[in-house]
Amino acid sequence: MRIILTSLVLFAASTTSYAEKSEPIQGQLENGLRYTLLPLHSEKGRIEIRMKVNAGAIDETDTQLGATNVLKHLVLRGTKAHPNGLTPYLNEQKWKPENNYRIESGYDHTTYHMIPPSTSNLDKSLYLLEQMLFQAKLTQEDLDDERKHILEEWRQAQSVGRLMNQKRIAAVRADSRYADRAIIGTAENIQNLPATQLQQFYQTWYTPNNMQLLVVGDIEPEAAQQQIQQRFSSFTAKEMPKRDYLEPKLSEGLAINKLQDARSSVSQVAYIFRFDEMKHRVRTNEARYERLIDRLALALLSQRLQDQSAALPKGVSAITVRKSDIGRNTAALGWFATVASTQHELGLKQIFSEIEHLKGSPITEEELTKQKEAVQIQIENAKKDENDRDFQQWLQIMSESVLADKPYLTQKKLAELLEPMLKKVSAKEVNERIQQWIGSKDRLINYQPPRKVQIKPITLETVNKLQAEAEQTELAKTEAEKTEVEKAEVEKTEATQPATEKNP
């Protein structure tokens, strides 16, 4: 399996005339608002803007549930300069929702996207952001009038996929605010949220020192900096609340969760480990090296499972492994078995067997070398990169680096950093990392029967029995393999010895 390093994202050279080189220009106003400008002039008049507010559903207090989603609607209602609503003004100026502006909310952020139409420009876009982010009225009258539209949007979003995903998030991020915060809120939240709580959320989090602006496109940097200064410098920075709820609380033990929806056909069981990765998240070369080990280890695990997929028992169609962030410094490694409608215990036992096999047969230097070769190819390509991108590629790079609070590095610089690290990584380090993951004491099992299928509940007793069976099976297999190796060695030795005459 080929590993793709997120810190080394290679783009094919554009075949259009729009590819060009550029360098980001970064700055910060005295009130703390950070900005990044990336001038691109090949597409005359094209500009794209992102304003990220570091506040989302996870920042809502118990009396503000649903505020993040409701704000997306209310900032388009009455503002200081447009008391009767900003939307009529947007329509008048030929700004179309989704095409020219949209607001994306998440657990820990809200991002305002803008693509000004040909009838507008950067200054007009910044004016609109100023009205939304700092001048919204958020009146009770506007809120009451908008509720029906918000509720209708909420109803349309109640797909089985979204609901099951919310259940999985609640399970994997248990013992954190993620577990009981829905990005779009609930019908009850939307119906009951008062304007006073919405205003409090807005006043707390919508402050310049909690925002970051990205402007990409046909701009003159000096003029753009002046416009940013004029629009946003008058707003005062505030002391931000401590966000001490961004991490799930880790503990020792096993949690077992049944997830089911009559509309979902998914039949799956997962064994998940949760662990702290704070040392891997800092901006040092040491942390970058640790992340490289992580990525190699995950790729090697995936390759192992892929190589062994033909030997899966009937009733288990696939086993995969995935690693994801569940907090700023917390991660989860999950083993997922896709199973027949009533074969969840079999799938779980197979996961345990794969883990036991890994303990007895660790990753080899040969396996690691193959993965390194794939990464080295990427590095060689990165060395040749001329740092020319088309508009969309530049926008993606800036969004995934500076707007995500990560440093922007050219492909050549990334190659320069990663090449010596790649040579250094050993199979011993990779195996130690894998053992750290599967040795985590914070574990959970999620099992999902399809539709309305009823199966025997998976209990702690069930888990202990399946683990013991997997251990015994793997032990017997190892002993058998050992015997075969010893037998082969004896036969090889006998074959190489000279023949001797038998005694009369």
Image (spheres, helix red, strand yellow):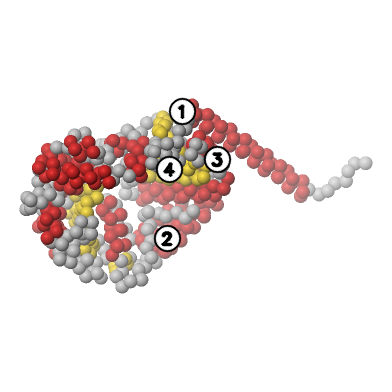
Helix, strand or loop status at disc 3: helix
| Mark 3 vs 2, N-terminal side | 3
Residue density around tag 3, few if under 14, some if 14–19, many if 20 or more, within 10 Å: some
Disc 4 vs disc 3: Cβ atoms closer than 8 Å?
Answer: no
- The residue at 23%/56% (across/down) is 98
The residue pinned by badge 2 equals 379
The residue pinned by badge 4 equals 265
Type of amino acid at the residue the image marks with label 2 = Ile
Q: Position of residue 253 (x, y in %)?
A: 41, 29
Measure how far apart labels 2 and 1 are at the Cα level. 46 Å
Measure how far apart labels 4 and 3 are at the Cα level. 30 Å
Q: Nearer the viewer, mark 1 or mark 4?
A: 4
Q: Position of residue 400 (x, y in %)?
A: 30, 54
Q: Position of residue 128 (x, y in %)?
A: 13, 56
Measure how far apart labels 4 and 2 are at the Cα level. 41 Å
| Mark 1 vs 4, N-terminal side | 4
| 117 w.r.t. 76: above or below | below
Disc 2 vs disc 1: Cβ atoms closer than 8 Å?
Answer: no
| Mark 2 vs 1, N-terminal side | 2
| 210 w.r.t. 225: above or below | above
| Mark 4 vs 2, N-terminal side | 4
Q: What numbered label is drawn on residue 357?
A: 3
- The residue at 12%/49% (across/down) is 77
Disc 3 vs disc 2: Cβ atoms closer than 8 Å?
Answer: no
Give the quadrant of residue 165: top left
